[in-house]
Amino acid sequence: MVQIFRNAHGVEGLHLATDCFSEEVERRIFSANRRYKGSRNGRESGGPTGPTSWWPDDYTKLTNLIRDCGLLPGYVPPNYCLHLKYFVGSAFCHHYDSRHRWGEVIVGVNLGQSGVIYFVPKDGHESMLPPGMNSIRVTLPRRSIYIMSGASRLDWMHGIAKQQPTQPPPSWNKQNVRVSLTFRSTKVFSDVYLKRQHQIETDVEKQAELQARIDSQERFYPVHEYGGKKMSKDEVERHRKKANELLDKMDRGEIRAQLRFEQHEVTFPLPAACASNGYVTNGATVAPAAAFQGGGRLLGSADDSDNEMKKAINASLRSLAEDRATRRRKKDHSGRSSSDKGIVVVDLLSDDEEDQKKESGGNGKMSPDVIVIDD
């Protein structure tokens, strides 16, 4: 059964879903052949090869799983993916993922072995940490997916702790490595997608949510991949044209955006509109995923080419407003969690001040029994 932890370990905007799919799916994605372009600090980066259709079906299915299980219903489809291997002893120093190069959220999928992601607040905001701690560490179990949005994306730096497996690896992970898939949407692609969604949305409330997300993202101008140089107006227009062309292909079905895992491959009930072949049958368009650096590629690309303001609007969390309202209606008397159709949701930052006081015991600190999510 999927368990979703909202604002994991008290880090606002960090959402984690555990036990998302079967071990067979994990093995299949983990074992897929890839070219690697070299190693750094014990990590190897790489990605799939091929023409426009290079994007693996399983990656598209992962994108739809993120929406279907309720982890992020308003997920902007990624058009870039980084595939990394973490060997024992390897790590990744804390950093920001550029808000000028990438869109609203960062998504990570963990395969083969557990790992630990840690969060460090920006300078001058050390009071965000629990007393006596210099970071917040979150365990990423096998087959888990995490979302960095809002404050976790903008106000905290994140890094990967030294890889030190505590559990025996599965038999198919001979090297005892951890594979990480990081999905991102490039800045211009994300902007174009949100504006297209706003144009076709008829619900006034959802239109307002989309406009808030658009306004928040427009605070960050697009930059080039290398060097961080600001794009000219002409360059932005060229990228917008490419983004629209790619989204048109998705809408026409030239890129199979509606693929989903089979029911036996996931741990929650799929939407009723899904047929046995994994496609959506009601005509709804679900945008797919794509790929990234190392040996990866931009979705639709034919080659391998391809830090601070006052707390920004938590626009990414606005996309969860509808889901949040649903969870409020389903809350049990404790106000902490809800369960529906094989999905358990735990919100570690309550939506109202009174619930927040109850959860923290009145002292403003998250109670330990709530924040522990280690498997």
Image: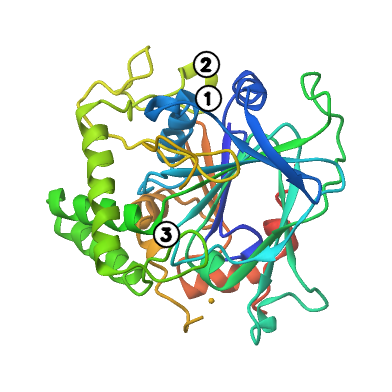
Residue linked to disc 1: 266
Q: As rendered, which of 238 and 111 lies closer to the eye?
A: 238
Looking at the image, residue 115 sits to the left or right of residue 293; the answer is: right
Where's the C terminus, which quadrant? top right
Residue 248 in the image: x percent, y percent? 21, 37
x and y, in percent, of residue 337 in the image? 54, 50
Measured Cα–Cα span from mark 3 to mark 2: 31 Å
Within-10-Å neighbours for mark 2: few <14, some 14–19, many 20+: few
Residue 118 is tagged as none
Mark before the other along the chain sequence, 1 or 3: 3
Query: Which residue in the structure is indicated by mark 3?
Result: 104
If you read the primary sequence from the N terminus, does the residue marked by circle 3 or circle 2 appear first?
3
Residue 270 visible, this orientation? no
Three-letter residue code for mark 2: His
Residue 50 vertical position relative to residue 226 in the rendered view, above or below = above
Instruction: Kindly check if marks 1 and 2 are in contact, taking CB atoms under 8 A apart as contact.
Output: yes
Q: Residue furthest bottom?
A: 124
Amino acid found under the numbered disc labelled 1: Val
Q: Using the numbered discs, state the Cα–Cα distance from disc 1 to disc 3 in whole angstroms.
A: 26 Å
Asked if one can make out residue 144 in the rendered structure from this viewpoint, the answer is: yes
Residue displayed at 25% across by 20% down: 281
The N terminus - image quarter: top right
Per the rendering, the mark at residue 264 is 2
